[in-house]
């Protein structure tokens, strides 16, 4: 394998890492002048480093570079981009996250008497990593380690709705398999569904995987990582259709917020 002999390469990488470390401490973003003040870098050097990180997808900026003139750099805000978020998410321990989720999943299962579970995006696959069943059931409908159909599962849609288009295209390619007569089988229909998930903050699976089962899920947003997790409830149609949907969706959103707080602390500890 060919390696770089440029003595400047380590220095450039070190400075880029310093920029990303600085921005990781400011999820709301920083303007150019604040970064220059914190890092003590020459203006031209910082411009070059930021440009490289933006083109690599490691940073995002507002206004975008192609929509702003040269004189607007002082007003432009920079923050960590989706590529870094995916790297941070990949570094998270599924076992640890599953352990942290047990109490909240148990509360959901006991409140609605249905199976509650947690799913996670790992590379281009979405899989369940933790499940809690209500006291009356001796089995669950989604076991840990189960791969979720990305175009059909509520848990998968809740995650996919917040991924970049290129990743969605990579994960969901036509023809999408029809698992039941209600399964979405075109990318166009799936995109419309994902837009609805982004608008409402809730995803549904209405007998799209198995006839007789309904599932509902909420995304779990993590600062600097984005949405790589979802929390769900699943149960038989004849029970789920009589459940108070407003109460169920609100409980899932509340659980997602609580999980996000727990995971944020865990990710900070693992990446410190």
Image (cartoon, rainbow, N blue to C red):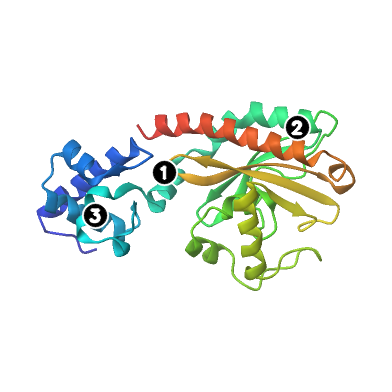
Q: Residue at x 33, y 55 (%)?
A: 63
Mark 3 is surrounded, within 10 Å at the Cα level, by few (under 14), some (14 to 19) or many (20 or more) other residues, namely: few
Q: Residue at x 56, y 62 (%)?
A: 171
According to the picture, the residue beneath numbered tag 1 turns out to be: 88
Left or right position of 69 against 101: left
Which mark is on residue 109?
2
Q: CA distance from mark 2 to mark 3?
A: 52 Å
Between circles 1 and 3, the one closer to the viewer is 3
Q: Residue at x 32, y 63 (%)?
A: 67
Residue 161 lies, with reference to residue 187, above or below; the image says above
Kindly indicate whether the residue at mark 3 contacts the one at mark 1 (C-beta within 8 angstroms).
Answer: no
According to the picture, the residue beneath numbered tag 3 turns out to be: 72
Assign the C terminus to one quadrant of the image. top left
Residue 108 lies, with reference to residue 36, above or below; the image says above
Query: Please, what secondary structure does the residue beneath circle 1 have?
Result: helix
Q: Is residue 131 visible?
A: no
Mark 1 is surrounded, within 10 Å at the Cα level, by few (under 14), some (14 to 19) or many (20 or more) other residues, namely: some
Answer with the quarter of the image where residue 217 lies: top right
Query: Please, what secondary structure does the residue beneath circle 2 have?
Result: helix
Q: Residue 104 at what x, y percent from top left? A: 65, 29
Q: Is residue 203 visible?
A: yes
Mark 2 is surrounded, within 10 Å at the Cα level, by few (under 14), some (14 to 19) or many (20 or more) other residues, namely: many
Of residues 79 and 261, the one drawn nearer to the viewer in this rendering = 79
């Amino acid at each position: 394998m060919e390696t770089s002999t440029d003595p400047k390469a380590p220095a450039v990488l070190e400075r880029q890492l310093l920029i990303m470390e600085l921005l990781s401490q400011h999820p709301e973003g920083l303007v150019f002048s604040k970064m220059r003040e914190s890092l003590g870098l020459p203006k031209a050097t910082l411009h070059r480093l930021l440009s490289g990180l933006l083109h690599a997808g490691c940073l995002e900026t507002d206004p975008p570079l192609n929509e702003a003139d040269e004189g607007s750099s002082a007003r432009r805000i920079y923050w960590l981009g989706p590529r870094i978020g995916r790297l941070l998410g990949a570094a998270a321990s599924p076992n640890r996250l599953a352990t942290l989720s047990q109490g909240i999943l148990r509360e959901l299962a006991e409140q609605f008497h249905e199976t509650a579970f947690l799913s996670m995006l790992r590379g281009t696959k979405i899989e369940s990593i933790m499940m809690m069943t209500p006291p009356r059931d001796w089995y669950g409908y989604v076991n840990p380690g189960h791969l979720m159909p990305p175009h059909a599962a509520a848990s998968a849609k809740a995650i996919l709705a917040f991924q970049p288009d290129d990743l969605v295209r990579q994960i969901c390619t036509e023809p999408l398999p029809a698992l039941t007569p209600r399964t979405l089988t075109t990318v166009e229909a799936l995109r419309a569904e994902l837009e609805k998930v982004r608008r409402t903050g809730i995803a549904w699976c209405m007998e799209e995987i198995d006839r007789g089962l309904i599932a509902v899920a909420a995304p779990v947003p993590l600062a600097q990582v984005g949405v790589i997790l979802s929390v769900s409830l699943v149960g038989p149609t004849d029970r789920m259709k009589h459940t108070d949907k407003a109460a169920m969706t609100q409980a899932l959103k509340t659980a997602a917020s609580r999980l996000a707080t727990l995971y944020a602390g865990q990710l900070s500890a693992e990446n410190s």
